[in-house]
Amino acid sequence: MQVYTSATISLSSHLAQPGRPAPLESGPLQPVMFFPASSEIYAQGEKAGAFYQVEFGAVRIYRLLADGRRQISAFHLAGETFGFEAGTTHHFFAEAINATGVRVFRVTGGADMSHQLLPLALKGLTRAQEHLLVLGRQNAIERVAAFLVDMVERQGGLRQVELPMSRVDIGDYLGLTIETVSRVFTRLKDKGVIRLLNLRSVEILKQDVLQTMGE
């Protein structure tokens, strides 16, 4: 795995972007660590003790099941924080989806960051609960629609949504096959709900319809 550390940079541009969470304020600004596409950030079973904020790019959190299948539990986009663990070791793998920059924040014994960490941890818990509700739906269209609505909200409500993850990733996140995911995207396109600009960009044409489908 190749990891590159950049010089400390300003977050003024980060703050100026609508729809993105504010960066953490924990003393000196942490440098950005660069992870190439598909490189591992941390592995299941490794010692925990830090949390991570995505500066650019995207991260997938997953676990390998006993039969070798992969279950993705979360995606994290620019400005979002991940890596919180209840114990001393990581229970999941974290991997860069594309070229990704991450700031690593290590919690020291004398630092009181509870006022910042608690809201972030609760937000992660809420998102995990919402993901379970999505997986509980029987209809594949409902799952994909709910996923797209979530991506819209996390990207500031923009009409054009970027999807850094592949169709395989989306399937592993929603409990669907890649064939089913592709069919649903095509069906949504044929219904005039979305426009497929390319494999990584979707234009939402009827957000109210999409919202109804995902409820």
Image (cartoon, grey):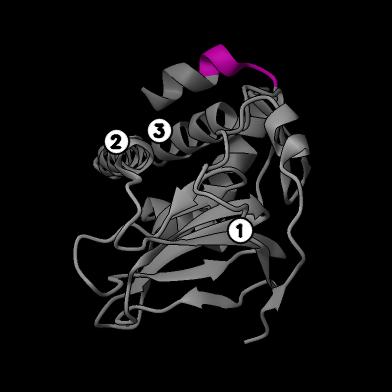
Could you give the CA–CA distance between mark 1 and mark 2, rounded to whole angstroms?
A: 27 Å
Could you give the CA–CA distance between mark 3 and mark 1, rounded to whole angstroms?
A: 40 Å
Name the front one of labels 1 and 2: 1
Q: Earlier in the sequence, mark 3 or mark 1?
A: 1
Disc 3 marks which amino acid? Glu
Name which quarter of the figure residue 31 lies in: bottom right
Front-lying residue, 115 or 109: 109
Residue beneath disc 3: 142
At which x and y percent is residue 175?
A: 36, 55
Q: Which residue is drawn at 43% across and 54% down?
A: 82
Q: Which residue is drawn at 39% across and 60% down?
A: 83
Residue beneath disc 1: 30
Magenta part of the chain? 205-209
Name the front one of labels 3 and 1: 1
Q: Check the image and report above or below for 145 versus 98.
A: above
Residue furthest top in the image? 208
Q: Quadrant of the N terminus?
A: bottom right
